[in-house]
Amino acid sequence: MTWVILFTCLKRYFYDTILRHLIFTVMSNFIIIAADMHKIAEFSIDVKYRHPGKGVECLPVEFEIFQDGNYFKAIPLPSFETWTLTNLQNEYTFQIKNCKTYNCKKGAEEIVDDIVTKMVQMNVVEIPWVSTGKMNSNKE
C-alpha cells in the first residue's frame, strides 16, 4: 500500500515538473520573440488541408505577425485539431523584397503568400500588387 502511494506521489511530481518545464520553455520563446520583434497584426487566413475522401478543404487559422526590420514572423494560433489536420509549422519567417517573398521554407510558400496578401489588404505593409493579385514567392 505504501509503495502505491509513493509511486502515485512520484508520478504526480514527475508530471508537474515536466509540465512546468514545458510551460516555461514555451513562454520563454514568446518572451524572446516579443523582445526582438514587435507585433504588427493579428488576423485569420484559410489554410488548405487534404481531407480523405473529400479532397481539399480549408480551415480558418489565426496568426500573429511580428516584424523586425525587413523580416517578418507569422505564428499560427490554431486549435490542436486544426494543427494536426493542417500540419502547420510553429512559425513562418520570411522577408519581403522587390514585391516578392524570400527566405520562407519549402512547402510554406502558399501560406506565406496568403499572409502577405492579407497584410497588404489591411495596409500593414505597402507593396505594389503584381498582376495576379498575389505575391510571388522566391527562395534565396
Image (cartoon, rainbow, N blue to C red):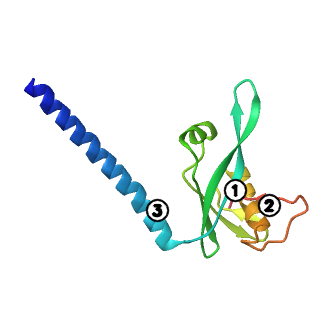
Most foreground residue, 78 or 96:
78
The residue where tag 2 is placed is 135
The residue where tag 1 is placed is 112
Quadrant of the rendered image containing residue 79: top right
* On screen, residue 123 above or below 10: below
Camera-near label (1 vs 3) is 3
The residue where tag 3 is placed is 30
Residue 30, how many percent across, how many down? 46, 62
Which mark sits nearer the N-terminus, 1 or 3? 3
Q: Quadrant of the N terminus?
A: top left
| Amino acid type at mark 1 | Val
Residue at the far right in the pictured view: 131
**Helix, strand or loop at mark 2:** loop
* On screen, residue 134 above or below 13: below
How many dots with numbers? 3
Camera-near label (2 vs 3) is 3
Residue 18, how many percent across, how many down? 30, 45
**Residue plotted at (87% across, 64% down):** 130
| Amino acid type at mark 3 | Phe
Q: Is residue 126 left or right of residue 131?
A: left
Q: Are marks 2 and 1 in contact (CB under 8 Å)?
A: yes
Residue 67, how many percent across, how many down? 60, 71
Q: CA distance from mark 2 to mark 1?
A: 9 Å
Most foreground residue, 110 or 22:
22
Q: Is residue 122 left or right of residue 90?
A: right
**Helix, strand or loop at mark 1:** helix
**Residue plotted at (73% across, 65% down):** 119
Please tell me how crowded label 2 is: few (under 14), some (14-19), or many (20+) other residues with Cα within 10 Å: many
